[in-house]
Amino acid sequence: MMRDERLIFEKSVEGRIGYSLPENDVPEVELESFYPVELLRETAPEIPEVSEVDVIRHYTNLSKRNYGVDSGFYPLGSCTMKYNPKINEDIASMEGLAQMHPLQGPQSAQGNLEILYNMDKYLSEILGMERVTLQPAAGAHGEMTGLMIIKAYHMHRNDSKRVKIIVPDSSHGTNPASAALAGFEVVHIPSDERGCVDIKALEDILDDTVAGLMLTNPNTLGLFEEDILKISEMVHGCGGLLYYDGANMNAIMGMARPGDMGFDIAHVNLHKTFSTPHGGGGPGSGPIGVVKELVPFLPVPVIEKVNDRYILDYDRPLSIGKVKSFYGNFGVILRAYSYIRTMGAQGLKVASQAAVLNANYIRKKLEDLYEIPYNRICMHEFVLSAQKQAKNGVTALDIAKNLLDEGIHPPTIYFPLIVHEAMMIEPTETESPETLDNFIDIMRQLAIKAQEDPESLKNAPRTTYVSRLDEVKAARTPVLRWKK
Amino acid sequence: MKSSYIPMTKQQQEAMLSAVGVKSLDELFSAIPEKLRLKEDLNLPKPLSEHELKKHMHTLAQKNSDTCENSCFLGAGVYDHIIPSAVQHIISRQEFYTAYTPYQPEISQGVLQSIFEYQTMISELTGMDAANASLYDGATALYEAVLLASRFNGRKEVLVARSVNPEYRKALYSVLKYSGITIKEVDFNKEENDPAGKSGTVNLEQLEGKLSKDTAAIAIQSPNFFGILEDIKAISQKAKEIGALLIAVCDPISLGMFESPGALGADIAVGEAQPLGNPMNFGGPLLGYFAVKSPLTRRMPGRIAGETTDSQGRRGFVLTLQAREQHIRREKATSNICTNQALCALAAVSYLSLMGKEGLKEVATQCINKSVYTYQSLLENRQVSRVFDAPFFREFVVKPKIKPSVLNEALLAEKIIGGYDLTAEYPELEGCWLVAVTEKRSREEIDYFVDKVNLMCREGL
């Protein structure tokens, strides 16, 4: 294959165009007399001058240097890289749904409002919550929204001394970052020897300065918090609220619900659990559900149904306000809506069951060659450690890079932080046993090679468009843009 | 139950259960306390086949009336621009849209290079030194900018022009509420006796009066919410004198024509890049852009792609400056953002590549020509009156003889989506109407719109 490393800018030819616009059919405005001259741009921005075919070839070639779920197995733990059904893409661009202006008013948007209203209902049912806001654009954004609600709730009760949010040490980095953004002090609690929240440690820090606890369940080790009812009882007992990080909701759809566990707020990632594509990093969608007591604090607007018409309700005095423009990532919500409607209650449950079975199957087939720190029945994912291999100089990173040469996207590595040489494996339900067996074979071969010929694993990947990249250089002398 | 998305057969399931060493699926869930396990199915509508889903969604779509069916004269932050066909084809490449965040750079060069190109184009448009890989939307980009400014200079007050998009200001109020940062708003000139008359621009006297050593940043928008261009340079001088940062919210299409905020002295440029090749999507996904001058680069929120070399010395790209981010810094991160709007950024970079220097300028020029033509045609008939007297871009304010809410309803019956009613957000502009005209509107559509407005205003409703 011929390498073409050029940027789109380096393909620019002066005077070439790639657009087709209608002729201007109205009188021309004389710019220099309409605008103060100093406001007009002196030098045009360096936007490339290329033809349509140049653009298509350029980005098609770039796409070939990328790996998506449609390319192959993507067991990236914590990210739920399940297959993205194609019908959902068609629905998202369906005429009459996508080409809507957000401010055109409820009168001409009844169809979209009905979708949002029903989506609120479906997600409320799945989470066991009273109402859901679809406004947050991603999981972290949902966390921030939930924490703002916790803050608003305590302030409304004139309980201003509650300044702390408790976060387990195994949590996603977004949890403490979101808590800080909502103006809380973050307190970490350790995990116990079973990989769950250390109840004793929790007991020690619970007092009337605690605003709430954020918990990922199943946790980032892929384990269900067995003491979950005790935890929620304890936190509620001291007057705190419970936030459920639902990034791992794919494990328990139709099996159990955060609301029933005593949680007050829960987010879900539509771009994980509900099959919407990740887009190479986004857009996502992170709706949050809340219990009845917290409904008044939800962001505005809330969509209500009055006499069979859907309205946008902004008149909510206790609302935290807005966390972004408009009503959420509607295009993403449409895909998730389609998914829920095609799966139904049983389909969602079967998906979670298959996801959990797949994860346990891989775990079982690798447990003799890799160390599995908390080795018991897991939920939709599990964490193994490459510590055994690391003793021979083969790290989790090396194993990951060797998987690239086998055409597999590596698991999440070096997370959660509480496991050394961590590899977090989440197969999802959309992978066949044949795919899992192939992955297991490869992982086993790598473990054997790590024992017999560790040096042979140090130079991967060899088959990718680029080999290992110098990240230190990138950070030390940042080059963040092209310059002419 | 069988699903086309779940390949495991019943037989395989049995074999796998026995490989795991459990007797049933239920046993896999034994860690869930018995009383929490659902005994019945969730209460959800029964599943639909693909065909049935399409029919169902089509029924819902028919309850809408979209911008394909109607001529759209509504903007207010989200705009109905022409999107070249090639954009959808590029973002529909599965290698792009079904990929996760590029954590494994060797198999993510496509996304990483496209982000690098996007960062370059945003930097070029805004006249800034660096841009990030995207934020959720313009509103979230603004609050991130204010948080950055306050962290940077340790000051705890921000002056925000009331001519900044009200949706953005609302998100700013919510998010800053418990941050310890106070928001002070600055009015716009709207009366004869205001410092700049009826210009619709930031009231500089008031701004100066509110500036202090506590001011972390001034946030303005240009073209502002009323479509009017602000004097960024004059405001940046005031900011500099007192050591505050200037945050400019700018529309990217307008930057094909007007001087960049960077060249005029802004320190941070943020805004909504939806007009660059992204559909309106009923308000989401949108595309927040974020660009800064170099002293602020390492404090930016969100993902950033950087150039480097591989072990054979070839050019490649990685996510960089990650020490700022939540997965490493946790509560000390510059932001909590993780997932962003990568695919929308890819649409933007595709759009800009297709339009090129010339095309972008042509879009801006047609927006000017068509909006000015609409404005003058409306005024000529004396059924709407002038509100501001300054030059605008793509969007303008007028006051029709009848209430905008009533007018919009009547226009909808004529297959027109009318302008934005300013009454609720700006009581001082009661009855005023914000009309947007992009390159997508033909003269025929404009003339029809103007005729209908005249007729409705003249005859009353």
Image (tube, coloured by chain):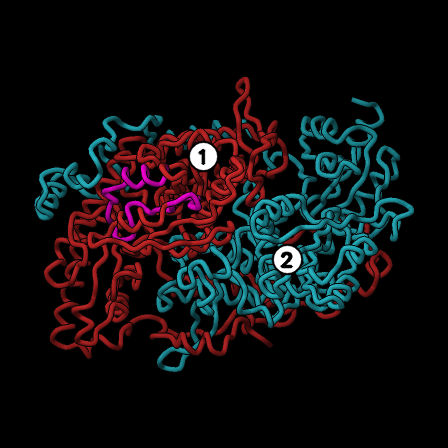
Chain colours: A red, B cyan
Viewer-side residue, A64 vs B397: B397
Identified by mark 1, the residue type is Val
Span of residues in magenta:
A207-236
Residue projecting furthest to the top: A307
Direction from residue A131 to residue B440 in the image, left or right:
right
Residue B101 horizontal/vertical position (percent):
40, 58
Where is A325 relative to B384, above or below?
A: below
Residue at 78 percent across and 32 percent down: it is B453
Residue B13 horizontal/vertical position (percent):
14, 42
Q: CA distance from mark 2 to mark 1?
A: 33 Å
Residue B422 horizontal/vertical position (percent):
73, 37
Identified by mark 2, the residue type is Lys
| Residue A437: quadrant of the picture | bottom left
Q: Which residue is mark 1?
A: A132
| Residue A62: quadrant of the picture | bottom left
The C terminus of chain A, quarter of image:
bottom right
Category of crowding for the residue at label 1, using alpha-carbon neighbours closer than 10 angstroms: few (below 14), some (14–19), many (at least 20): many
Query: Is residue A228 inside the magenta stretch?
Result: yes
Q: Which residue is mark 2?
A: B156
- Provide the secondary structure element on which disc 2 rests: loop
Viewer-side residue, A273 vs A163: A163
- For disc 2, the chain is B
Q: Are marks 2 and 1 in contact (CB under 8 Å)?
A: no
Direction from residue B38 to residue A303 in the image, left or right:
right
Residue projecting furthest to the right: B193
